[in-house]
Image (cartoon, rainbow, N blue to C red):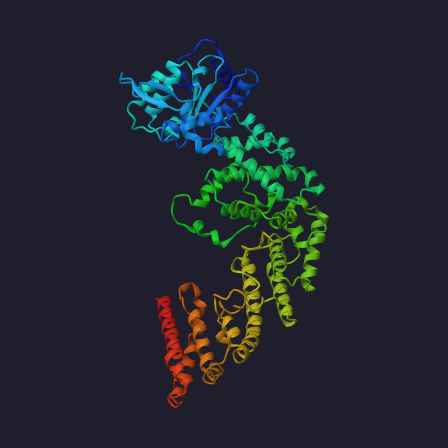
Amino acid sequence: MQTEIISNEKTNQALEDYLIRYCTRNIPPYFSVLIEGPWGSGKTWFINCLREKLNNIHKKRCLYVSLYGAKQTSDITDQFFQQLHPRLASEGVQRSWSILKSMVKVSLRMDLDFDQDRDTLNVSLPELGKMASPEGSILIFDDFERCGIPPSEVLGFINQFVEHEGYRVLILANESKIENGDKKFEEIKEKVIGRSFRIKPQTKQAIDSFIDELVNDDSIEVLKTRKKLILDVERRGKHNNLRLVRQAVLDFSDIWSCLPVEKEELKKNLDFLDRLVLDVFSFSIEYRAGTIKPEHILKLENGGFLFSQIKSDCNKTSTDPSDFDKARERISVHKLTESWEFALSPATYFAFFSQGHLSHHEAADGIAYSRYFITDQNPVWHQLWYRRKLDDESFTRLSAEALDKLSCLQYSEWGELFHIVGILLNLAEKKLINYSIDEIFSIAKDVVDRLATQKRINFGNRKSESRGYFDKESAFNHGFIGIKIPQFQKFIEYYDDALRKGRHEALFEWANEWMEELNTNVKLWSSRINPKSEVDALYANQAIFCYINPSTMTKSIINSQSNTINEINQALQYRYGRLNTINQWQLEELSFWQECLAEIETILQSRDKKLLSTFHLNENLVPTIKNIVRKLEELKQKISH
């Protein structure tokens, strides 16, 4: 039997007309109809639309069952029963389920395997006897390929209703996924299925339906006026999968619900709305099709959005395209490679698709740094970041203002400072300002020196530095424009040197304060270096012992009583319980403990052995320190090799 291909919207209408005739003609057809197509092609959506017309216009009731996961015929007939008797099948009468089915049970004789033997099968299919006429119901079997019953047996089950009872039966399947090991399937298929059609998605109509599902949703009007844009995205992707489109509609609704949509300027900014629809539908469809990952959105260049944690596959020397190269090719299909054009920041899209949701704070940040809402109230660096939108007068004014504010130390926060320096270096490189790259670099270093002298460089708090590892490439969800200029990298190093110097001085002060706690509150002292102490662990991941004189630590230990010694011992065991190459900062404390150990052992040689504190030092703390030194030395040797 040849499959008839339904390839466009118009011929799908022809298929619908045929199926209505098939389902409503007075003469029983004695064959079923197969509607075939890949997953996501819209078979279920198409049949639901057909069911609605058959019911509303032609007064034909359709009984729909999904064969997905069915392992026995009773799993199928139970679904019919629940539709025919929703009250009887409700939770309140579940205990009487078997009795109810037996009351309406029809004993059917059918040739399940077409071997000419009449096999007896008791099918709990209620009240089907009166539905064989044109006035009866139409049976629809969806997800045929996902049924747990062998395909030939399922067709044998369906054949009873088609051949012997004259039912109108529609079967929905992805034939490419039907089990090939069933040798009788093709033979039985020719006897049971009279017509077979293959359809492609009716995307335009489906989009209307998906949008209408968003009842009382504020995003409906936005989507309804941009259906052509959505259709263009789907067609460029060439996935032919309506499930992806429907999920993209839901994704857009989720993102829209998090945006500050009460602001009129958001709704009135048509360019922003167009771009938001393009971004969300393109990213959603490709992400859910498995062609891109959320981190690929962050990795797009040309807009300055670069993140080291996902650079690795770009550095591959393999001749095969890297994972990102393949993703970029897919993204370029939708013309999304210019990340500075995004409606929201790449970080906002990354947050949504990686987490599955978007906080109002993340959404607000995405709007705040969107180029579609740039005004003269935005920071100077932000306006210059999107300089493609500026006229000559505004550009000249802003570039001069940026340099003036930089020289006057108005940028002390590292994010703004890095953005301004990167932008000015970039403008100097392109000869858009009357300064050379080296001149801007010199000015920037002088600014750092003066900020350091005035102690205005933020080096963080006791627990962590002010900047993370990846902050070398971006701030405020925007990558640094001048990141590829060598002088910009040198500027970052220069700033970090000043930051480390300031932090180094502060750590000496903090360490002295911490050592005072050893004499007043040893438990609090211990919690500062215990990684399991969530609140007080200020120095759990810092080489704080490097800022203490070993003799000071030795004196505190020797003068301590047993309870303090044991508390110190436990704290050190927690701190150095896991040594690995990731925590290489721990190696900085090796020399400290080597000196402490030597001093303590020297003192213990002449110390009274009968003192309880001496006993705990020899039995507990000294072995712990020896073990720390040994493990750190092993780690050092491992790293060196």
Q: Quadrant of the C terminus?
A: bottom left
Is 373 rendered above or below residue 198? Answer: below
Q: Position of residue 133 (x, y in %)?
A: 46, 12
> Taking 13 as reference, is 129 left or right?
left
Q: Position of residue 398 (x, y in %)?
A: 70, 53
Is 27 rendered above or below residue 160? Answer: above
Q: Position of residue 139 (x, y in %)?
A: 45, 20
Q: Position of residue 1 (x, y in %)?
A: 36, 16
In this orientation, which residue lies closer to the viewer: 547 or 220?
220
Is 400 rendered above or below residue 60? Answer: below
Can see residue 82?
yes
In this orientation, which residue lies closer to the viewer: 341 or 200?
200
Q: Quadrant of residue 172 in the image?
A: top left
In this orientation, which residue lies closer to the viewer: 533 or 8?
533
Q: How many numbered circles are shown?
A: 0
Residue that extends furthest to the top in the rendered view of this protein = 27
Q: Residue at x 56, y 60 (%)?
A: 487
Can see residue 300?
no
Q: Residue at x 40, y 67 (%)?
A: 579
> Taking 205 as reference, is 158 left or right?
left
Is 577 rendered above or below residue 39? Answer: below
